Image: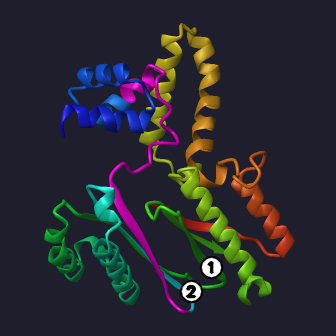
Amino acid sequence: MSSLENIKLLREKTGAGLGACKQALAECNNDVEAAVTFLRKKGLADMAKRAGRETKEGRVSIKVSEDGNTVAMAYLGCETDFVAKTADFIGLVDKISEYMLQNPDVADYTKDEKITAMIHELAPKFGENVSFNKAVCWKKGEGCGVINYYLHSDNKKAALVELVCDKTDGCCGKKEEVKELARAIAMQAVGMVAQYLNESEVPAEVIEKEKDIAITQAKNEGKPEAAIEKMLPGRIKKFFKDVCLLDQPSIKDNKKSVQEIIDEESKKLGVNLKVTRFVRF
């Protein structure tokens, strides 16, 4: 990738200025991810909400079984938006997701020979590199619950959410309401770029990296050690609110967290609802 392309990518990821991006890449041997950290330590980038965004072109396709208990989601990448909008490309990613829906027990779809053959058959027609590295097929777990999704209008961003409850009779007759809540949570995951379900899912090395960035920023601002120690827990808490789905301020009511909205809906419906998993492309 050329330096100009790296500069563009770094600006998209961080929102930092042209000069700052050039300097960061020069300091980091043209390594984009290292440059992101470099800019954050200088306080020139807010990456918490941007970290999960894809910059390449492509398309998401989602297929659902008739009973709603199995959902397949596939992302096929390409180099340009022009190719992503062609009928052949759209048809290919839809064909892949339909195959996944019919074969829900494949361990790794990105290595499946039949999908690989589908891609190899059409890829030369596109005249671009085509990547397939994101694919999930969920079957509803045991007990009462639903899977639902949100697919953004550009077909480039989507999320799946599974909600379960403590009832055994179809969410106490409130399945449609629970499905709608699951869709709203999936929309939250897409719009607010959720990366983890809750604090316990954030890897220790990610937390340590955030602490290092916060400490470096504070030192650059001339804050004393005692002040840094006091502000660190609050800074990490803010990071969790940015990247953890259940901790994020709800897009429905930003004075409440997503978990608080779930708790309110649970009380209204007379069930105990819990998000067991989500995935965002």
**Spot occupied by residue 158 in the image (x, y as percentages of width and height):** 49, 64
Secondary structure of the residue carrying tag 2 is: loop
Where's the N terminus, which quadrant?
A: top left
Which of the 4 quarters of the picture holds residue 140?
bottom right
Q: Which mark is residue 146?
A: 1
Above/below status of 81 relative to 122 = above
The answer to whether marks 2 and 1 mark residues whose Cβ atoms lie closer than 8 Å is yes
- How many neighbours does mark 2 have within 10 angstroms: few (below 14), some (14-19), or many (20 or more)? few
Answer yes or no: is residue 205 visible.
yes
Tell me the magenta residue range.
Answer: 37-66
Residue 212, disc: none
Q: Residue at x 79, y 75 (%)?
A: 271
> Does 200 appear in magenta?
no
Residue 199 located left or right of residue 43: right
- Mark closer to the chain start, 2 or 1: 2
Looking at the image, is 168 positioned above or below residue 107? below
Q: Residue at x 75, y 77 (%)?
A: 177
In the image, residue 195 lies at what x, y percent? 50, 52
Is 40 left or right of 191, judged from the image as shown? left
- The image's mark for residue 68 is 2
In the image, residue 24 lies at what x, y percent? 31, 23
